[in-house]
């Protein structure tokens, strides 16, 4: 899976949260939010990461940016191993890696005007004068489709789509190369979602950005991503180029996800076969033995209950973790 052109390489990444009990708060177990995932992202690529709520997508994005220290694994950004860096070294590297958060209502400080919100990264990481910062803020707001008249307004005066544009302007303030987009459209109306996604694509083409696009909306991920990875209970189930994953899914979980998404053609929708999953997602504090998906998989055999499947390449660029493939 190694690639010299890759901007980001993730190998065996784990994030386990300790479960503490008793008066002395002793560890009695761990919630395995991310449990050994590996992938790469090429320069200028949009890599989609999809899965149900609670599967560990957001945690993976934050651990990659070192917002949380990982339990184990490697994160290599542009040839630099992030997990072994000091906090000060990570801080110096921070302008090159940014994040757009999921909730535009919670990620903006309600007491700060838009100009202050967008300028804050420049205050922390650059030595620009007040005048230079002010000019840069106007450029960024114009870049994301907001005029200078919005500068002195506060977050509560904006719609959800406008707030997400402000969050995007703030993420672009330090001219990053890599942006983690953590479900940036899930809190927005459908009509606004398309605007934000089109804006992300326009900015990528104009500025040469690389995205990790985290979402559970399969149609939007198909629209924006070049390659897609499917995550379940902290592990990667399947990873492939976009067209191949959507047209020829190999893992039963991927097949179930795709069959759950409605098709706009009523004739096809009425005649297609759907794979309905039974039961609930197990707790990450007590994941099943063997394949973590076997408790809900309609095709599971005894081997699936005992042995953890390898995440292996079964076709060029197409990886899957399933004994039956």
Image: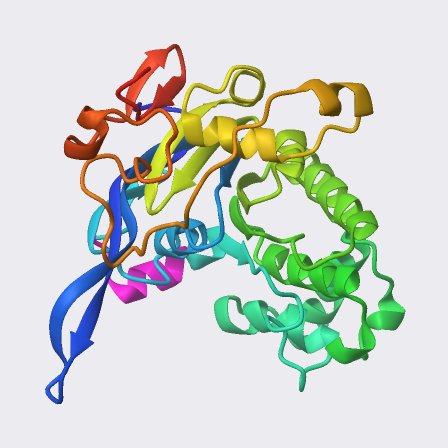
- Report the side of 219 relative to 62 (left or right): right
Quarter of image, res 320: top left
What residue appears at the point 29 percent right and 55 percent down from the top-left corner?
284
Does the stretch in magenta take in 92?
yes
Residue 271 appears in view:
yes
Q: Does 184 sit above or below residue 110?
A: above
Depth check: 70 or 293 in front?
293
Indicate the position of residue 248 as horizontal and vertical percent values: 52, 15
- Report the side of 96 relative to 216 (left or right): left
Figure disc tally: 0
Q: Is most of the magenta stretch helix, strand or loop?
A: helix
Depth check: 273 or 14 in front?
273
Does the stretch in magenta take in 192?
no
Indicate the position of residue 183 as horizontal and vertical percent values: 58, 52
Residue 43 appears in view:
no
What residue appears at the point 80 percent right and 19 percent down from the top-left corner?
267
- Report the side of 134 relative to 183 (left or right): right
**Residue lying furthest bottom in this view?**
23
In the picture, the quarter occupied by the N terminus is top left
Depth check: 174 or 259 in front?
259
Indicate the position of residue 196 as horizontal and vertical percent values: 74, 48
Range drawn in magenta: 84-93
What residue appears at the point 58 percent right and 39 percent down from the top-left corner?
209
Indicate the position of residue 288 as horizontal and vertical percent values: 23, 45
Q: Does 179 sit above or below residue 2?
A: below
In the picture, the quarter occupied by the C terminus is top left
- Report the side of 35 relative to 177 (left or right): left
Q: Does 113 sit above or below residue 84?
A: below
Quarter of image, res 77: top left
């Amino acid at each position: 899976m190694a690639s010299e052109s890759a901007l980001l390489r993730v190998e065996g990444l784990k994030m386990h949260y300790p479960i503490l009990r008793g008066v002395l708060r002793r560890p009695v177990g761990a919630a395995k939010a991310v449990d050994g995932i590996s992938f790469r992202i090429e320069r200028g690529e949009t890599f989609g990461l999809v899965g149900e709520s609670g599967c560990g997508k957001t945690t993976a994005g934050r651990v990659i940016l070192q917002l949380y220290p990982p339990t184990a694994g490697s994160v290599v950004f542009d040839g630099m191993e992030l997990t072994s860096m000091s906090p000060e070294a990570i801080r110096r590297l921070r302008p090159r890696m940014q994040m757009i958060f999921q909730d535009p209502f919670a990620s903006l400080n309600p007491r700060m005007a838009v100009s202050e919100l967008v300028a804050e990264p420049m205050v922390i990481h650059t030595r620009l004068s007040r005048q230079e910062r002010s000019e840069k803020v106007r450029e960024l707001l114009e870049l994301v489709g907001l005029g200078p008249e919005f500068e002195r307004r506060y977050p509560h005066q904006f719609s959800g789509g406008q707030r997400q544009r402000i969050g995007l302007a703030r993420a672009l303030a330090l001219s990053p190369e890599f942006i983690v987009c953590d479900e940036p459209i899930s809190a927005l109306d459908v009509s606004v979602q398309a605007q934000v996604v089109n804006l992300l694509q326009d900015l990528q083409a104009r500025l040469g950005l690389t995205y990790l696009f985290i979402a559970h909306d399969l149609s939007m991920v198909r629209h924006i991503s070049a390659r897609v990875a499917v995550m379940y209970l902290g592990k990667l189930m399947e990873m492939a180029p976009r067209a191949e994953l959507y047209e020829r899914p190999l893992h039963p979980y991927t097949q179930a996800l795709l069959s759950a998404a409605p098709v706009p053609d009523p004739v096809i929708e009425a005649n297609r076969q759907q794979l309905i999953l039974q039961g609930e997602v197990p707790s990450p504090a007590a994941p099943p033995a063997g394949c973590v998906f076997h408790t809900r998989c309609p095709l599971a055999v005894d081997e699936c209950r005992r042995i953890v499947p390898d995440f292996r390449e079964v076709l060029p660029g197409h990886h899957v973790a399933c004994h039956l493939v």
